[in-house]
Amino acid sequence: MNRLSDILDQMTVILSALKDVMDAEQKQLSVGNIQSSALQRITEEKSSLLATLDYLEQQRRSAQKAQHSANDDIADRWQTITQKTQHLRDLNQHNGWLLEGQIARNQQALELLKPHQEPSLYGANGYTASASRGGKKISI
């Protein structure tokens, strides 16, 4: 196998791994209670895979310049990569919508809880909240 074929095979493997990670991300975003540590791990793994994919893309371009004649095998592999990339783009967009929904629900929960928040211990002037409400200061 030549260098370009090896690079395309590696890209296909990374794209499959990226799909698994994005499926896990989607599952995490679809549950009512998100585990932030799990989502952070997923995000870090996704970033690592995307960096690897970017590196392989640079290698592919270099190898393709070196090999001017593309055969059917290379074309088939590139078609597979293109299809997987389009599917992952759609999956990523869907996950973004799920994340926006989670953010909106969290914002609604915060707005619901705001009226019930305990007053601050100190006011903006630096005095206790009771002193800032017009309470009398007593000097001895």
Image: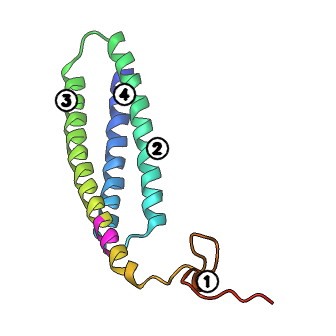
For label 4, count other residues whose C-alpha is less than 10 Å away and answer few (under 14), some (14-19) or many (20+): some
For the image, the number of numbered tags is: 4
The front one of 15 and 4 is 15
Whether residues under marks 1 and 4 lie with C-beta atoms below 8 angstroms apart, the answer is no
Q: Amino acid at mark 4?
A: Glu
At x 34%, y 66%, the residue is 28
Residue 30 picture location, percent across and down: 28, 68
Above or below residue 38? Residue 2 is above
At x 32%, y 54%, the residue is 22
Compute the Cα span from label 3 to label 1: 76 Å
Find out whether residue 113 is within the magenta segment.
no
Residue 88 picture location, percent across and down: 25, 46
At x 44%, y 37%, the residue is 51
Compute the Cα span from label 4 to label 3: 17 Å
On the rendered image, what quadrant is the N terminus found in?
top left
Q: Amino acid at mark 1?
A: Ala
Whether residues under marks 4 and 3 lie with C-beta atoms below 8 angstroms apart, the answer is no
Q: Which residue is mark 2?
A: 48
What segment is highlighted magenta in the picture? 104-108
Q: Which residue is mark 1?
A: 131
On residue 57, the disc is 4
Whether residues under marks 1 and 2 lie with C-beta atoms below 8 angstroms apart, the answer is no
Above or below residue 89? Residue 118 is below
SS for callout 4? helix
Query: Given this view, does label 1 or label 4 mark the residue nearer the observer?
Result: 1
Q: Which residue is mark 3?
A: 76
